[in-house]
Image: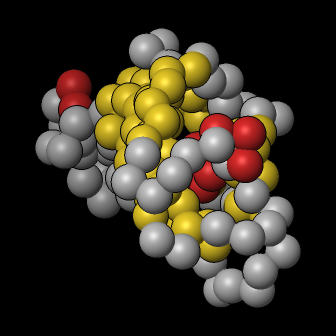
Amino acid sequence: MMNLNLADLSLRVGERHTCTCSLEIAPVVLGGVEYSVLAPDGMQIVVERIAGGYLVDIEFNAKVYGPCTRCLKECSLEVPVAQQEYSPATAGEWDEGSMFIEDLEVDVSGLAREALVLAMPQPLLCAEECKGICAVCGADLNSGPCGCDGLE
């Protein structure tokens, strides 16, 4: 788990802090299917001090690996991820803001994981034109008709 303490940055209104850090994300499970995730270029974090609080922006490109929803072949997708969160300037101040920022402490790992899940396309496909598999014989319909008397 990676955290960022906003108070430690000592930013004044109008100032900004930018950094790039490595990012490890545990596999994501959607609909009972596990997808591996890599962020080879790391994650960029931008913290901007605004009147009354902080804006925290994260951005990274994820590579997601797992089975295609239709044909079950292994596929990989590039998923651009971006998320912005707000935190009040005073620790402990009540706010309906981010569930990833508490007492000026940002749960960067949790924020990144949530942003990734929201950015992932549904369904995950190897190609938009994927035909899937035959419901009767299980043949890959991307290779051509299966030849069974099923529901092609």
Q: In the image, what residue occupies the spot 56% across and 46% down? A: 11
Relative depth, front residue between 11 and 56: 11
Q: In the image, what residue occupies the spot 63% across and 72% down? A: 88
Q: In the image, what residue occupies the spot 42% across and 46% down? A: 15
Which quadrant of the view contains residue 97? bottom right
Please tell me whether residue 21 is drawn above or below residue 29 in the rendered image.
above
Q: Position of residue 8 (x, y in %)?
A: 73, 39
The answer, for residue 21, to whether it is visible in the render is yes
Q: Position of residue 19 (x, y in %)?
A: 50, 25
Whether residue 59 sits left or right of residue 20 in the image: it is left
Relative depth, front residue between 11 and 103: 11
Whether residue 72 sits left or right of residue 36 in the image: it is left
The answer, for residue 118, to whether it is visible in the render is no
Q: Position of residue 146 (x, y in %)?
A: 27, 36
Q: Position of residue 60 (x, y in %)?
A: 42, 32
Please tell me whether residue 50 is drawn above or below residue 24 in the rendered image.
below
Relative depth, front residue between 123 and 142: 123
